[in-house]
Image (cartoon, rainbow, N blue to C red):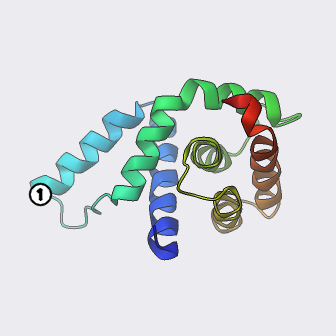
Amino acid sequence: MAASSGSAGRRQAVELVFEAFSRDQGLLDLVEQRAALVASNQVDDAVPLLPEAVGLVRGVAEHQVVISEWLDTYSHGWTQRRMAAVDRAILYVGAYEVVFADDVPDTAAINGAADLAGKLSTGRSAGFVSGVLGRLSKIKPTLL
């Protein structure tokens, strides 16, 4: 996966996870709706789904329960309710990449997630996201 397509796919995946969580909608349902919308050609500005984004969202959906447990356990002092919604979406995608995506080095996943947090959230979010994902990376063998 090239760096530009990886970061574009990661960003789109975060946007999809954010939207699904905000709407209290299933991740896979949202992906299916988006794909159908693009295929219908009824909306001029419908953005095609990147294969990388779809793969990340499917991975998050498959492991959503365990990722939620990890975030509750390893984001010391921060419940998911206290997290900024965009940080939470970034953490779900990042946690999936760090723990389950063998084709992405942990440092690339952590740095990519922190970069997105810096662009899309608050000034402190990049450090928070990096810290949580760094913890998951360090203990990954015990998580699998």
Residue at the location (11% across, 57% down)?
42
Q: Which residue bears the numbered disc 1?
A: 42
Quadrant containing the C terminus is top right
Looking at the rendered structure, the kind of residue marked 1 is Gln
Residue drawn at (14%, 54%), measured in percent from left and top? 39
Q: Is residue 109 visible?
A: yes
Asked which quadrant contains residue 69, the reply is top right
Q: How many numbered discs, if any?
A: 1
Quadrant occupied by the N terminus: bottom left
| Extreme residue toward the right, this view | 77
Residue 78 location (% of width, % of height): 82, 35
Q: Nearer the viewer, residue 131 or 77?
A: 131
Residue 101 falls left or right of residue 122: left
Q: Residue at x 52, y 67 (%)?
A: 7
Question: Residue 3, image x and y in percent?
Answer: 52, 73
- Percent x, y of residue 83: 73, 41
Question: Is residue 80 at least partly visible in the picture?
Answer: no
Q: Please indicate whether residue 88 sits to the left or right of residue 24 in the image.
A: right
Position above or below: 84 against 43 = above
